[in-house]
Image (tube, rainbow, N blue to C red):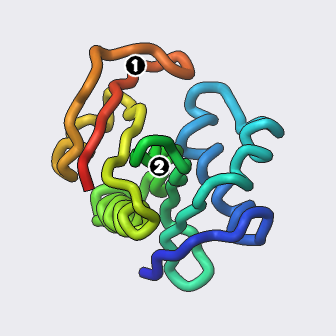
Amino acid sequence: MALKIIDYDSKEYWKMVELRNEILRKPLGMTLNEQDIQADKDHILIGAFEDDELLGCCILVRGQEGSAILRQMAVRSQLQGKGIGRALIEFAETIARDSGYSEIAMDARASAVGFYEKMGYRPCSEPFEKVSIPHVLMKKRI
């Protein structure tokens, strides 16, 4: 498995959009819109690949005051539980640390809180609704 930063508007980027729609949006009856896609050009886009196949992805948003934001974490359904998500987060943390950030924050889906806790993230809020499902603010010092 190769982990790498994806160039905006590349062939790999459009695979990332497809995966995010499939895993994160379609189950909620949503799709990424033009505003979401335009915003991606300002973020760090990360993918896990096996040859030419995108296995999983996430986005790092450049935050303020030493905190980066992890967003849009998605791993192909049939590959979840095989270490791809862990590898993506570790890679994202390295990129964030190397970019001068000392913390990563995220709005984690409530169903994924246990996974993020295993990665050292701690809940920092009560559950709240975002895109029609419960989320929790989580943070980790890196």
**Nearer the observer, 138 or 10:** 138
Label 2 sits on a secondary structure element that is: strand
| Residue 112 visible at all | yes
Image height of 13 relative to 20, above or below: below
The residue positioned 35% from the left and 59% from the top of the image is 89
Position in image of residue 26 (x %, y %) = 63, 35
Residue type, mark 1 in image = Pro
Label 2 or label 1, whichever comes before in sequence order: 2
Whether residues under marks 2 and 1 lie with C-beta atoms below 8 angstroms apart, the answer is: no
Few, some or many C-alpha atoms within 10 Å of disc 2 (few <14, some 14-19, many ≥20)?
A: many
Name the quadrant containing residue 87: bottom left
The residue positioned 24% from the left and 49% from the top of the image is 141
In the rendered image, the quadrant that contains the C terminus is bottom left
Label 1 sits on a secondary structure element that is: strand
* Mark 2 vs mark 1, CA separation in Å: 16 Å
Position in image of residue 49 (x %, y %) = 52, 75
Residue located beneath label 2 in the image? 73
**Nearer the observer, 26 or 115:** 115
Position in image of residue 36 (x %, y %) = 72, 39
Query: In this rendering, would 74 be left or right of 22?
Result: left
The residue positioned 39% from the left and 24% from the top of the image is 135
Residue located beneath label 1 in the image? 134
Residue type, mark 2 in image = Met
The residue positioned 73% from the left and 55% from the top of the image is 41
Query: In this rendering, would 5 be left or right of 1?
Result: right
